[in-house]
């Protein structure tokens, strides 16, 4: 196995470990055990916990950017806001289905890294593009598009948290009911 593959394997295991057992469970020893590697293997690739957390941040942020780009949210013109709400709901539902561990680890790390401006900002700004949100609200003539964009992203963050750790955590992603719930919620915030 190449060094790059081993590093990716360790980072992915770290994300899963955080998602399943919490941030406190993240240790080099726990990773070695989970991956059935000889003791000290993960610390060979990531000398410090900080280096490991940076790699996790990079992985989550780059996957988030790639997923956002792949979703194909076109540059918004004045458009059918219910269709936009539905499109974003489908995208969020897919993230909840396919990248649940990333979303949980991201939230855990956002809280854990409050004192680290750089890593905190990279994670906090990695779910939805603020620029794209502003453009959407400007194109649809919202009175204060900057505030509307920030509020909408806060709603997206809350919706994601609600679905993996809140009152709606029992609503399975990848179902019509999941998409309907998200579409209904987001539609309320896409009214001028």
Image: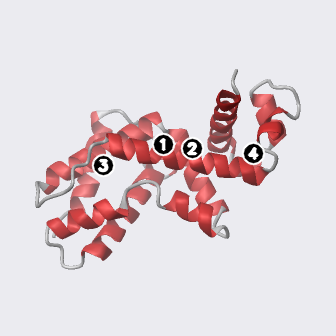
Residue, disc 1: 63
Q: Residues within 10 Å of mark 3 (few under 14, many from 20)?
A: many
Considering the numbered disc 1 on the image, is that residue within a helix, a strand or a loop? helix
Q: Residues within 10 Å of mark 4 (few under 14, many from 20)?
A: some
Residue, disc 2: 59
Which residue sits at x=24%, y=52%?
A: 184
Q: Are marks 2 and 1 in contact (CB under 8 Å)?
A: yes
The mark that comes first in sequence, 2 or 4, is: 4
The mark that comes first in sequence, 3 or 4, is: 4
Tag nearer the camera, 1 or 4: 1
Residue 77: x %, y % from top left: 13, 59
Q: Are marks 2 and 4 in contact (CB under 8 Å)?
A: no
The mark that comes first in sequence, 3 or 1, is: 1
The mark that comes first in sequence, 1 or 4, is: 4
Q: CA distance from mark 1 to mark 4?
A: 21 Å
Q: CA distance from mark 3 to mark 1?
A: 22 Å
Disc ID at residue 26? 4
Residue, disc 3: 182
Residue 48: x %, y % from top left: 80, 50
Residue 131: x %, y % from top left: 33, 64
| 107, 13: nearer the viewer | 13
| 43, 17: nearer the viewer | 43
| 151, 40: nearer the viewer | 40
Q: Is residue 127 left or right of residue 13?
A: left
Q: Residues within 10 Å of mark 1 (few under 14, many from 20)?
A: some
């Amino acid at each position: 196995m190449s060094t790059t593959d081993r590093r990716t394997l360790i980072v992915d295991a770290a994300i899963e470990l955080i998602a399943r057992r919490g941030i406190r469970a993240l240790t080099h020893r726990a990773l070695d055990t989970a991956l059935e590697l000889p003791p000290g293997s993960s610390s060979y690739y990531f000398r410090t916990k900080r280096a490991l957390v940076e790699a996790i941040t990079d992985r989550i942020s780059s996957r988030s950017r790639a997923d956002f780009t792949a979703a194909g949210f076109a540059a918004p013109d004045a458009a059918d806001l219910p269709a936009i709400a539905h499109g974003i709901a489908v995208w969020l539902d897919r993230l909840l289905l396919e990248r649940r561990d990333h979303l949980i680890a991201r939230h855990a790390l956002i809280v854990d890294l409050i004192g680290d401006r750089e890593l905190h900002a990279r994670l906090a700004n990695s779910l939805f593009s603020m620029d794209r949100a502003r453009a959407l609200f400007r194109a649809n003539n919202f009175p204060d598009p900057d505030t509307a964009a920030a509020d909408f992203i806060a709603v997206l963050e809350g919706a994601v948290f609600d679905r993996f750790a809140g009152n709606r955590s029992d609503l399975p992603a990848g179902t019509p009911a999941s998409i309907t719930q998200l579409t209904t919620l987001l539609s309320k915030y896409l009214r001028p």
